[in-house]
C-alpha cells in the first residue's frame, strides 16, 4: 500500500516538475546509502523515515549525508516523528494535552508510531533533531510545524 501511495505522489510531482525532480529511495541503515545518488540536489525531502533509525548515533550520520548531497544553499525538508510525546512527565500540562489527544483518537495511550510488531518505535526529541542538524553543518534550522509527535523540520546548507 505504501509503494502505491508513493507512486501516485511521485506521478503528481513529476507531472508538475518534469525532469527537474528525481525520486530516489535508499536504505538509511546502510552507511554508504548516499554514495550512489546522483547529487548534488537543490532539495532533499524525507517523510516518516528517519525516526525509524531510533537513536542519535544512527540519525546524526544521515543528517551529515543529506547535507553532503545538497548544493550550497540547498534545503532539507523532513516530516517525521519525535519522542517528545512519550517523554512528557505525567503530571504536566503537556502530558495532559497528549492524553486528551489520545482520548479523542479513541485510545488510552499517547500517540506514537506503531510498527507491525505492535511495538512503538520512539525517536529522540525535537531539540535533539534541531541540534543534530546544526551539528551536521546546516543553518536556518527550524521546526515550522509541530502537532503532538509529528514535526516538519527544515534546514539549509550554507552557501
Image (cartoon, rainbow, N blue to C red):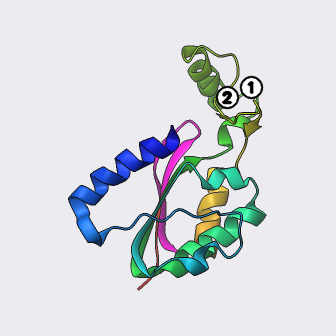
| Residue 158 figure quarter | bottom left
User: Which numbered circle lies on residue 3?
Assistant: none
**Mark 2 packing: few (<14 Cα in 10 Å), some, or many (20+)?**
some
Residue under label 1 = 91
Residue 30 higher or lower than 48, as above or below: below
For this orientation, the residue located farthest to the left is 16
Magenta residues, dominant SS class: strand
From the top left corner, tell me how far across and down residue 33 is, in percent.
63, 72
User: Which residue is at the front of the view, 118 or 85?
Assistant: 118
User: Residue at coordinates 70% horizontally, 22% vertically from top-left?
Assistant: 109
Residue 146 higher or lower than 124, as above or below: above
User: Which residue is at the front of the view, 120 or 22?
Assistant: 22
User: Residue at coordinates 75% horizontally, 29% vertically from top-left?
Assistant: 118
Q: Are marks 2 and 1 in contact (CB under 8 Å)?
A: yes
From the top left corner, tell me how far across and down residue 42 is, in percent.
37, 75
- Please indicate whether residue 154 sits to the left or right of residue 148 in the image: left
Q: Secondary structure at mark 1?
A: loop
**CA separation in Å, label 2 and label 1:** 7 Å
User: Which residue is at the front of the view, 19 or 113?
Assistant: 19
Q: Is residue 15 magenta?
A: no
Q: Secondary structure at mark 2?
A: helix
- Please indicate whether residue 137 sits to the left or right of residue 4 in the image: right
| Residue 89 figure quarter | top right
Which quarter of the figure is the C terminus placed in? Answer: bottom left
* Range shown magenta: 137-153
| Residue 14 figure quarter | bottom left
Residue 51 higher or lower than 24, as above or below: above
User: Which residue is at the front of the view, 7 or 87?
Assistant: 7
- Please indicate whether residue 88 sits to the left or right of residue 126 in the image: right
User: Residue at coordinates 52% horizontally, 77% vertically from top-left?
Assistant: 37
Residue under label 2 = 95
Amino acid at each position: 500500500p505504501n509503494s502505491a501511495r508513493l507512486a501516485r505522489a511521485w506521478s503528481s510531482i513529476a507531472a508538475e516538475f518534469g525532469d527537474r525532480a528525481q525520486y530516489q529511495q535508499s536504505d538509511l541503515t546502510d552507511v554508504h546509502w548516499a554514495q550512489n545518488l546522483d547529487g548534488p540536489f537543490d532539495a532533499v525531502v524525507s517523510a516518516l523515515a528517519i525516526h525509524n533509525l531510533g537513536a542519535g548515533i544512527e540519525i546524526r550520520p544521515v543528517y551529515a549525508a543529506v547535507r553532503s548531497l545538497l548544493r550550497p544553499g540547498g534545503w532539507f525538508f523532513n516530516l517525521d516523528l519525535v519522542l517528545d510525546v512519550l517523554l512528557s512527565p505525567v503530571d504536566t500540562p503537556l502530558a495532559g494535552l497528549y492524553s486528551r489527544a489520545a482520548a479523542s483518537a479513541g485510545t488510552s495511550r499517547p500517540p506514537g508510531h506503531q510498527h507491525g510488531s505492535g511495538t512503538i518505535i520512539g525517536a529522540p526529541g525535537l531539540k535533539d533533531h534541531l541540534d543534530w542538524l546544526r551539528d551536521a553543518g546546516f543553518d536556518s534550522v527550524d521546526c515550522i510545524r509541530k502537532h503532538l509527535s509529528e514535526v516538519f523540520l527544515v534546514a539549509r546548507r550554507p552557501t
